[in-house]
Amino acid sequence: MRHRFVGFVVMAMAAAWLWSGPVPAWGQGQTWAGRSLARLLDTAHWRMNRLRMNASFSLADAGYDSDIFYGYLDERFPDYTFSASLPIQALFPISRTVVLELDEAPQYLFYQKNARERAWNNVLSGRLHVSLDKLYVQAGGGLSDVRRRMTPELDINVRERAGSLEGIILWQASRDVSFAALGDYVRYNYGELSLGEANVAQNLNRVEGFADLVSYIQPGAHVRFFLDGQYGRYAFTEIVNRQRNADSYAVFGGLSFLPPEGDEPPAQPFQGNICVGYKYFDILNPAYPNGSGLVGLIDVSANVFKRTIARAYVSRDYAFSVFSDAAFYLSTALSGGLSYQLTTALTLNYDFAFTRGKYPQSSPLGSAADYDFRYFSHTVNLSVRFARYLEVGLQAVLGRRTVANLNQARTRNVFGLTVLYGIPAGRVEVPARGLSR
Protein backbone atom coordinates (compact mmCIF):
# COMPACT_ATOMS: atom_id res chain seq x y z
CA MET A 1 0.00 0.00 0.00
CA ARG A 2 1.05 3.58 -0.65
CA HIS A 3 1.34 4.59 3.00
CA ARG A 4 3.85 1.79 3.61
CA PHE A 5 6.54 4.11 2.23
CA VAL A 6 5.20 7.49 3.32
CA GLY A 7 7.00 7.34 6.67
CA PHE A 8 10.43 6.88 5.08
CA VAL A 9 9.88 9.80 2.69
CA VAL A 10 8.60 12.12 5.42
CA MET A 11 11.47 11.29 7.77
CA ALA A 12 14.06 11.81 5.02
CA MET A 13 12.65 15.23 4.06
CA ALA A 14 12.36 16.33 7.68
CA ALA A 15 15.89 15.17 8.45
CA ALA A 16 17.32 17.16 5.55
CA TRP A 17 15.53 20.32 6.70
CA LEU A 18 16.38 19.94 10.37
CA TRP A 19 20.00 19.03 9.78
CA SER A 20 20.65 22.44 8.25
CA GLY A 21 19.57 24.49 11.28
CA PRO A 22 21.08 25.11 14.72
CA VAL A 23 20.38 22.72 17.58
CA PRO A 24 17.64 24.14 19.82
CA ALA A 25 17.74 23.94 23.59
CA TRP A 26 14.45 22.31 24.57
CA GLY A 27 12.73 22.70 27.91
CA GLN A 28 11.02 19.90 29.75
CA GLY A 29 8.51 21.93 31.77
CA GLN A 30 7.12 20.76 35.07
CA THR A 31 4.68 18.09 33.83
CA TRP A 32 5.60 14.43 34.28
CA ALA A 33 4.90 13.83 30.57
CA GLY A 34 7.20 16.70 29.60
CA ARG A 35 10.02 15.34 31.73
CA SER A 36 9.55 11.94 30.08
CA LEU A 37 9.80 13.58 26.64
CA ALA A 38 13.04 15.32 27.64
CA ARG A 39 14.51 11.98 28.83
CA LEU A 40 13.60 10.35 25.52
CA LEU A 41 15.41 13.09 23.62
CA ASP A 42 18.44 12.87 25.89
CA THR A 43 18.74 9.07 25.64
CA ALA A 44 18.09 8.63 21.89
CA HIS A 45 20.91 6.56 20.43
CA TRP A 46 21.68 8.35 17.14
CA ARG A 47 22.10 12.13 16.98
CA MET A 48 22.57 14.21 13.83
CA ASN A 49 22.27 17.88 14.68
CA ARG A 50 18.56 18.29 15.54
CA LEU A 51 17.59 14.77 14.53
CA ARG A 52 17.32 12.04 17.20
CA MET A 53 16.72 8.40 16.19
CA ASN A 54 16.26 4.91 17.58
CA ALA A 55 16.16 1.83 15.35
CA SER A 56 16.29 -1.92 15.73
CA PHE A 57 15.96 -5.16 13.77
CA SER A 58 13.76 -7.94 15.10
CA LEU A 59 13.49 -11.55 13.92
CA ALA A 60 10.67 -13.33 15.76
CA ASP A 61 9.42 -16.94 15.92
CA ALA A 62 11.86 -18.19 13.31
CA GLY A 63 11.10 -21.89 13.46
CA TYR A 64 8.35 -24.50 13.40
CA ASP A 65 4.61 -24.00 13.97
CA SER A 66 2.60 -27.23 14.36
CA ASP A 67 -0.66 -25.65 13.10
CA ILE A 68 -0.71 -22.10 11.76
CA PHE A 69 -4.55 -22.09 11.81
CA TYR A 70 -4.76 -23.36 15.41
CA GLY A 71 -7.59 -25.83 14.78
CA TYR A 72 -9.86 -23.42 12.89
CA LEU A 73 -9.74 -25.92 10.02
CA ASP A 74 -10.25 -29.64 10.58
CA GLU A 75 -6.94 -30.40 8.88
CA ARG A 76 -3.68 -29.41 10.58
CA PHE A 77 -1.33 -27.08 8.68
CA PRO A 78 2.23 -27.24 10.09
CA ASP A 79 4.80 -24.89 8.61
CA TYR A 80 8.17 -23.20 9.02
CA THR A 81 7.79 -19.48 9.54
CA PHE A 82 9.33 -16.23 10.77
CA SER A 83 8.58 -12.52 11.00
CA ALA A 84 11.17 -9.78 10.43
CA SER A 85 10.66 -6.12 11.31
CA LEU A 86 12.67 -2.90 11.27
CA PRO A 87 11.04 -0.27 13.55
CA ILE A 88 12.47 3.25 13.26
CA GLN A 89 11.74 6.20 15.55
CA ALA A 90 12.69 9.77 14.61
CA LEU A 91 12.42 12.77 16.95
CA PHE A 92 12.71 16.35 15.68
CA PRO A 93 12.95 19.19 18.25
CA ILE A 94 11.36 22.04 16.26
CA SER A 95 11.81 24.50 19.14
CA ARG A 96 12.53 24.36 22.85
CA THR A 97 8.91 23.42 23.56
CA VAL A 98 7.75 21.59 20.39
CA VAL A 99 8.90 18.12 19.24
CA LEU A 100 7.76 16.13 16.21
CA GLU A 101 7.88 12.33 16.51
CA LEU A 102 7.55 9.86 13.62
CA ASP A 103 7.50 6.07 13.96
CA GLU A 104 7.66 3.62 11.06
CA ALA A 105 7.54 -0.17 11.53
CA PRO A 106 7.64 -2.33 8.36
CA GLN A 107 7.37 -6.09 8.83
CA TYR A 108 7.47 -9.21 6.66
CA LEU A 109 5.69 -12.49 7.54
CA PHE A 110 7.09 -15.63 5.91
CA TYR A 111 5.58 -19.13 5.62
CA GLN A 112 7.50 -21.79 3.71
CA LYS A 113 4.60 -24.04 2.61
CA ASN A 114 1.57 -21.74 2.82
CA ALA A 115 2.52 -18.94 0.45
CA ARG A 116 -0.86 -17.23 0.77
CA GLU A 117 -0.09 -16.46 4.41
CA ARG A 118 3.01 -14.45 3.50
CA ALA A 119 2.50 -10.73 3.90
CA TRP A 120 4.04 -7.28 4.14
CA ASN A 121 2.84 -5.23 7.11
CA ASN A 122 3.38 -1.63 8.07
CA VAL A 123 2.49 0.68 10.95
CA LEU A 124 3.09 4.42 10.56
CA SER A 125 2.34 6.95 13.30
CA GLY A 126 3.18 10.53 14.10
CA ARG A 127 2.78 12.81 17.10
CA LEU A 128 3.37 16.48 17.86
CA HIS A 129 4.45 17.12 21.46
CA VAL A 130 4.07 20.58 23.01
CA SER A 131 5.67 20.77 26.46
CA LEU A 132 5.09 24.02 28.37
CA ASP A 133 5.71 24.86 32.00
CA LYS A 134 2.57 23.29 33.50
CA LEU A 135 0.84 22.16 30.33
CA TYR A 136 1.57 19.22 28.01
CA VAL A 137 -0.31 18.73 24.72
CA GLN A 138 -0.04 15.86 22.26
CA ALA A 139 -1.81 15.48 18.92
CA GLY A 140 -1.24 12.69 16.45
CA GLY A 141 -2.52 9.79 14.45
CA GLY A 142 -1.52 6.69 12.57
CA LEU A 143 -2.13 4.29 9.70
CA SER A 144 -1.69 0.54 10.01
CA ASP A 145 -2.01 -2.16 7.37
CA VAL A 146 -1.17 -5.47 9.02
CA ARG A 147 -1.92 -9.15 8.65
CA ARG A 148 -1.86 -10.50 12.20
CA ARG A 149 -3.39 -13.02 14.55
CA MET A 150 -6.65 -11.31 15.24
CA THR A 151 -7.92 -12.10 18.75
CA PRO A 152 -8.09 -15.08 21.13
CA GLU A 153 -11.53 -15.69 19.59
CA LEU A 154 -10.15 -16.13 16.05
CA ASP A 155 -6.45 -16.92 16.39
CA ILE A 156 -5.54 -16.88 12.69
CA ASN A 157 -3.93 -14.27 10.45
CA VAL A 158 -6.40 -11.60 9.31
CA ARG A 159 -5.69 -8.45 7.30
CA GLU A 160 -6.63 -5.39 9.35
CA ARG A 161 -6.44 -1.78 8.17
CA ALA A 162 -6.89 1.00 10.69
CA GLY A 163 -6.61 4.77 10.79
CA SER A 164 -6.51 6.67 14.07
CA LEU A 165 -6.47 10.19 15.52
CA GLU A 166 -5.66 10.99 19.14
CA GLY A 167 -5.22 13.98 21.41
CA ILE A 168 -4.01 14.54 25.00
CA ILE A 169 -4.03 17.59 27.25
CA LEU A 170 -2.29 17.32 30.63
CA TRP A 171 -2.33 20.10 33.24
CA GLN A 172 0.08 19.89 36.17
CA ALA A 173 -1.96 21.68 38.85
CA SER A 174 0.71 21.17 41.53
CA ARG A 175 3.72 18.98 42.21
CA ASP A 176 1.50 16.06 43.28
CA VAL A 177 -1.79 16.66 41.40
CA SER A 178 -2.49 16.69 37.65
CA PHE A 179 -5.51 16.40 35.35
CA ALA A 180 -5.85 15.10 31.79
CA ALA A 181 -8.38 15.00 28.96
CA LEU A 182 -8.00 12.40 26.19
CA GLY A 183 -9.77 11.77 22.91
CA ASP A 184 -9.30 8.82 20.52
CA TYR A 185 -10.84 8.01 17.12
CA VAL A 186 -10.15 4.72 15.28
CA ARG A 187 -11.62 3.30 12.05
CA TYR A 188 -11.19 -0.46 11.42
CA ASN A 189 -11.58 -2.10 8.01
CA TYR A 190 -11.25 -5.81 7.16
CA GLY A 191 -12.00 -5.59 3.45
CA GLU A 192 -14.44 -8.26 2.30
CA LEU A 193 -13.15 -11.02 4.56
CA SER A 194 -15.49 -13.89 5.40
CA LEU A 195 -14.35 -17.16 7.05
CA GLY A 196 -17.25 -19.60 7.17
CA GLU A 197 -19.42 -18.68 10.15
CA ALA A 198 -17.17 -15.72 10.91
CA ASN A 199 -17.96 -12.84 8.54
CA VAL A 200 -15.16 -10.67 9.85
CA ALA A 201 -15.69 -7.66 7.58
CA GLN A 202 -19.46 -7.52 8.03
CA ASN A 203 -19.31 -7.98 11.79
CA LEU A 204 -16.26 -5.88 12.69
CA ASN A 205 -15.85 -3.01 10.19
CA ARG A 206 -16.49 -0.09 12.55
CA VAL A 207 -15.54 3.28 13.98
CA GLU A 208 -14.66 3.67 17.66
CA GLY A 209 -14.44 6.91 19.61
CA PHE A 210 -13.43 7.48 23.24
CA ALA A 211 -13.31 10.44 25.60
CA ASP A 212 -11.61 10.24 29.01
CA LEU A 213 -11.21 12.61 31.94
CA VAL A 214 -8.43 11.51 34.32
CA SER A 215 -7.21 12.81 37.70
CA TYR A 216 -3.75 11.92 39.03
CA ILE A 217 -2.22 12.08 42.49
CA GLN A 218 1.49 11.32 42.90
CA PRO A 219 2.41 11.34 46.59
CA GLY A 220 5.96 10.13 46.00
CA ALA A 221 8.57 9.37 43.37
CA HIS A 222 7.61 5.73 42.84
CA VAL A 223 3.80 5.57 42.61
CA ARG A 224 1.04 7.52 40.84
CA PHE A 225 -2.70 7.00 41.54
CA PHE A 226 -5.41 7.78 38.98
CA LEU A 227 -9.19 7.98 38.59
CA ASP A 228 -10.56 7.78 35.03
CA GLY A 229 -14.07 8.36 33.70
CA GLN A 230 -14.63 7.15 30.12
CA TYR A 231 -17.32 7.32 27.44
CA GLY A 232 -17.06 5.13 24.33
CA ARG A 233 -19.04 5.04 21.08
CA TYR A 234 -19.00 2.16 18.56
CA ALA A 235 -20.59 2.61 15.11
CA PHE A 236 -20.55 -0.22 12.55
CA THR A 237 -20.19 0.66 8.87
CA GLU A 238 -22.11 -2.26 7.33
CA ILE A 239 -25.85 -1.48 7.16
CA VAL A 240 -26.80 -5.09 7.90
CA ASN A 241 -24.85 -4.98 11.14
CA ARG A 242 -25.68 -1.57 12.57
CA GLN A 243 -27.82 -3.28 15.20
CA ARG A 244 -24.49 -3.80 16.97
CA ASN A 245 -23.94 -0.07 17.48
CA ALA A 246 -23.16 0.50 21.14
CA ASP A 247 -22.17 2.97 23.84
CA SER A 248 -20.01 2.20 26.84
CA TYR A 249 -19.67 3.99 30.16
CA ALA A 250 -16.86 3.15 32.54
CA VAL A 251 -15.05 4.32 35.66
CA PHE A 252 -11.49 3.12 36.37
CA GLY A 253 -9.15 3.55 39.28
CA GLY A 254 -5.68 2.29 40.00
CA LEU A 255 -2.00 3.07 40.25
CA SER A 256 1.26 2.94 38.33
CA PHE A 257 4.61 1.92 39.80
CA LEU A 258 7.30 4.33 38.59
CA PRO A 259 11.04 3.70 38.25
CA PRO A 260 13.41 6.47 39.34
CA GLU A 261 13.83 8.98 36.53
CA GLY A 262 16.65 7.88 34.25
CA ASP A 263 16.77 4.28 35.51
CA GLU A 264 15.82 1.19 33.53
CA PRO A 265 13.56 -1.58 34.89
CA PRO A 266 13.88 -3.49 37.11
CA ALA A 267 15.41 -0.64 39.17
CA GLN A 268 12.50 -0.75 41.63
CA PRO A 269 11.06 -3.80 43.46
CA PHE A 270 7.72 -3.30 41.64
CA GLN A 271 6.99 -2.28 38.06
CA GLY A 272 3.79 -1.98 36.05
CA ASN A 273 0.17 -0.89 36.35
CA ILE A 274 -3.01 -1.85 38.19
CA CYS A 275 -6.32 -0.65 36.71
CA VAL A 276 -9.72 -1.86 37.95
CA GLY A 277 -13.15 -0.49 37.10
CA TYR A 278 -16.80 -1.00 36.19
CA LYS A 279 -18.14 -0.86 32.62
CA TYR A 280 -21.66 -0.72 31.25
CA PHE A 281 -21.68 -2.02 27.66
CA ASP A 282 -24.93 -0.81 26.07
CA ILE A 283 -25.99 -2.38 22.74
CA LEU A 284 -28.41 0.17 21.28
CA ASN A 285 -30.61 -2.51 19.66
CA PRO A 286 -32.88 -3.79 22.49
CA ALA A 287 -32.95 -7.27 20.89
CA TYR A 288 -29.36 -7.83 22.01
CA PRO A 289 -28.34 -8.31 25.65
CA ASN A 290 -26.19 -5.65 27.29
CA GLY A 291 -23.11 -6.30 29.35
CA SER A 292 -22.01 -4.79 32.63
CA GLY A 293 -19.62 -5.69 35.38
CA LEU A 294 -16.10 -5.47 36.71
CA VAL A 295 -13.30 -5.00 34.18
CA GLY A 296 -9.63 -4.42 34.71
CA LEU A 297 -6.00 -4.81 33.80
CA ILE A 298 -3.17 -5.83 36.14
CA ASP A 299 0.31 -6.00 34.61
CA VAL A 300 3.05 -6.03 37.25
CA SER A 301 6.49 -7.49 37.91
CA ALA A 302 8.59 -7.68 41.06
CA ASN A 303 12.12 -8.59 42.10
CA VAL A 304 11.31 -11.45 44.47
CA PHE A 305 14.94 -12.56 44.87
CA LYS A 306 18.32 -11.20 43.87
CA ARG A 307 18.27 -12.86 40.43
CA THR A 308 14.58 -13.66 40.08
CA ILE A 309 11.76 -11.53 38.67
CA ALA A 310 8.11 -12.61 38.97
CA ARG A 311 5.39 -11.43 36.58
CA ALA A 312 1.59 -11.37 36.84
CA TYR A 313 -1.01 -10.33 34.27
CA VAL A 314 -4.82 -10.22 34.58
CA SER A 315 -7.19 -8.77 31.98
CA ARG A 316 -10.99 -8.69 31.85
CA ASP A 317 -13.01 -6.70 29.29
CA TYR A 318 -15.73 -6.85 26.65
CA ALA A 319 -14.88 -7.37 22.96
CA PHE A 320 -16.95 -7.51 19.79
CA SER A 321 -17.38 -10.95 18.27
CA VAL A 322 -16.63 -12.09 14.72
CA PHE A 323 -19.72 -14.35 14.80
CA SER A 324 -23.10 -13.10 13.55
CA ASP A 325 -25.18 -14.46 16.43
CA ALA A 326 -23.07 -12.90 19.20
CA ALA A 327 -22.63 -9.14 19.46
CA PHE A 328 -19.84 -9.38 22.01
CA TYR A 329 -18.09 -11.67 24.48
CA LEU A 330 -16.38 -11.25 27.84
CA SER A 331 -12.66 -11.98 27.57
CA THR A 332 -10.71 -12.98 30.69
CA ALA A 333 -6.96 -13.57 30.55
CA LEU A 334 -4.56 -14.68 33.30
CA SER A 335 -0.84 -15.24 33.06
CA GLY A 336 2.22 -15.41 35.26
CA GLY A 337 5.88 -16.21 35.03
CA LEU A 338 9.40 -16.15 36.40
CA SER A 339 12.73 -14.97 35.02
CA TYR A 340 15.96 -16.27 36.54
CA GLN A 341 19.30 -14.72 35.64
CA LEU A 342 21.69 -17.65 35.31
CA THR A 343 24.64 -15.35 34.45
CA THR A 344 25.01 -11.72 33.48
CA ALA A 345 24.31 -12.70 29.85
CA LEU A 346 21.97 -15.71 30.24
CA THR A 347 18.34 -15.58 31.44
CA LEU A 348 15.80 -18.40 31.72
CA ASN A 349 12.10 -17.44 31.46
CA TYR A 350 8.91 -19.41 32.06
CA ASP A 351 5.31 -18.19 31.56
CA PHE A 352 1.88 -19.78 31.63
CA ALA A 353 -1.26 -18.17 30.20
CA PHE A 354 -4.99 -18.88 30.38
CA THR A 355 -7.64 -17.09 28.30
CA ARG A 356 -11.40 -17.58 28.39
CA GLY A 357 -14.10 -16.13 26.16
CA LYS A 358 -17.67 -16.26 27.47
CA TYR A 359 -20.68 -15.22 25.36
CA PRO A 360 -24.12 -13.99 26.47
CA GLN A 361 -26.51 -16.86 27.09
CA SER A 362 -29.30 -15.16 25.15
CA SER A 363 -29.04 -13.95 21.56
CA PRO A 364 -31.62 -12.95 18.94
CA LEU A 365 -30.07 -15.21 16.30
CA GLY A 366 -29.04 -18.38 18.08
CA SER A 367 -26.96 -19.98 20.79
CA ALA A 368 -23.86 -17.80 20.98
CA ALA A 369 -22.70 -19.74 24.05
CA ASP A 370 -21.69 -22.57 21.68
CA TYR A 371 -18.59 -20.53 20.87
CA ASP A 372 -17.29 -20.28 24.47
CA PHE A 373 -13.54 -20.96 24.27
CA ARG A 374 -10.61 -21.64 26.59
CA TYR A 375 -6.93 -21.41 25.82
CA PHE A 376 -3.97 -22.54 27.94
CA SER A 377 -0.27 -22.35 27.13
CA HIS A 378 3.21 -22.85 28.57
CA THR A 379 6.18 -20.83 27.29
CA VAL A 380 9.87 -21.47 28.01
CA ASN A 381 12.50 -19.04 26.75
CA LEU A 382 16.27 -18.99 27.06
CA SER A 383 17.66 -15.52 26.36
CA VAL A 384 21.32 -14.82 25.62
CA ARG A 385 22.77 -11.30 25.43
CA PHE A 386 25.83 -11.46 23.17
CA ALA A 387 26.50 -7.72 23.18
CA ARG A 388 24.97 -4.53 24.48
CA TYR A 389 22.64 -4.25 21.47
CA LEU A 390 22.29 -7.93 20.49
CA GLU A 391 20.00 -10.43 22.22
CA VAL A 392 19.06 -13.92 21.00
CA GLY A 393 16.34 -16.15 22.43
CA LEU A 394 15.27 -19.78 22.00
CA GLN A 395 11.58 -20.32 22.71
CA ALA A 396 9.05 -23.14 22.95
CA VAL A 397 5.28 -22.55 23.25
CA LEU A 398 2.89 -25.42 24.00
CA GLY A 399 -0.75 -24.39 23.56
CA ARG A 400 -4.15 -26.10 23.91
CA ARG A 401 -7.50 -24.64 22.84
CA THR A 402 -11.04 -25.90 23.45
CA VAL A 403 -14.28 -24.55 21.96
CA ALA A 404 -17.74 -25.47 23.25
CA ASN A 405 -19.17 -26.61 19.90
CA LEU A 406 -16.14 -28.71 18.90
CA ASN A 407 -15.74 -32.36 19.84
CA GLN A 408 -12.06 -32.22 20.78
CA ALA A 409 -9.36 -29.84 21.93
CA ARG A 410 -6.96 -28.39 19.39
CA THR A 411 -3.23 -27.98 20.06
CA ARG A 412 -0.59 -25.67 18.63
CA ASN A 413 3.10 -25.86 19.46
CA VAL A 414 5.71 -23.33 18.32
CA PHE A 415 9.49 -23.74 18.50
CA GLY A 416 11.52 -20.77 17.33
CA LEU A 417 14.44 -18.38 17.47
CA THR A 418 14.17 -14.67 18.27
CA VAL A 419 16.83 -12.06 17.52
CA LEU A 420 16.78 -8.41 18.60
CA TYR A 421 19.52 -6.07 17.44
CA GLY A 422 19.67 -2.32 18.02
CA ILE A 423 17.77 0.20 20.13
CA PRO A 424 13.97 -0.26 20.19
CA ALA A 425 11.78 2.83 19.97
CA GLY A 426 11.43 4.70 23.23
CA ARG A 427 8.11 5.77 24.69
CA VAL A 428 6.96 9.03 26.21
CA GLU A 429 5.08 8.42 29.47
CA VAL A 430 1.74 10.13 28.87
CA PRO A 431 -1.84 9.76 30.17
CA ALA A 432 -3.53 6.63 28.79
CA ARG A 433 -7.22 5.85 28.39
CA GLY A 434 -9.09 3.12 30.20
CA LEU A 435 -7.55 -0.34 29.94
CA SER A 436 -4.99 0.64 27.29
CA ARG A 437 -2.42 1.37 30.03
Image (cartoon, rainbow, N blue to C red):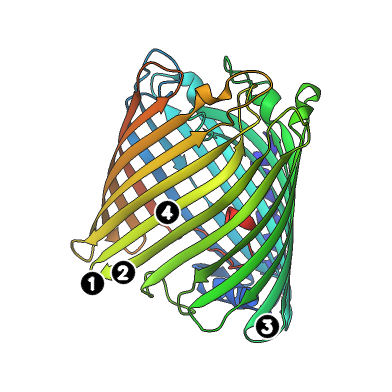
Q: Is residue 117 left or right of residue 336?
A: right
Indicate which label's residue lies in the foreground, 1 or 4: 4
Give the amino acid at mark 3.
Gly
Residue under the point 66% across and 51% down: 125
Few, some or many residues within 10 Å of mark 4 (<14, 14–19, 20+): some
Q: Which residue is mark 4?
A: 313
Indicate which label's residue lies in the foreground, 4 or 2: 4
Q: Earlier in the sequence, mark 1 or mark 4?
A: 1
Indicate which label's residue lies in the foreground, 3 or 1: 1
Q: Closer to the camera, 337 or 8?
A: 337
User: Which type of secondary structure does the marked residue at label 3 adopt?
Assistant: loop
Q: Position of residue 14 (x, y in %)?
A: 70, 60
Q: Do the numbered discs 2 and 3 sit on residues whose CB atoms are within 8 Å?
A: no
> Quarter holding the C terminus?
bottom right
Few, some or many residues within 10 Å of mark 2 (<14, 14–19, 20+): some
Give the amino acid at mark 2.
Asn
Give the amino acid at mark 4.
Tyr
Tell me, for residue 306, which label it has, or none: 1
Q: Earlier in the sequence, mark 4 or mark 2?
A: 2
Q: Is residue 193 left or right of residue 343?
A: right
Q: Do the numbered discs 1 and 4 sit on residues whose CB atoms are within 8 Å?
A: no
Few, some or many residues within 10 Å of mark 3 (<14, 14–19, 20+): many
Residue found at the very far front of the displayed protein: 362
Residue under the point 67% across and 33% down: 1
Tell me, for residue 303, which label it has, or none: 2
Q: Is residue 154 left or right of residue 265?
A: right
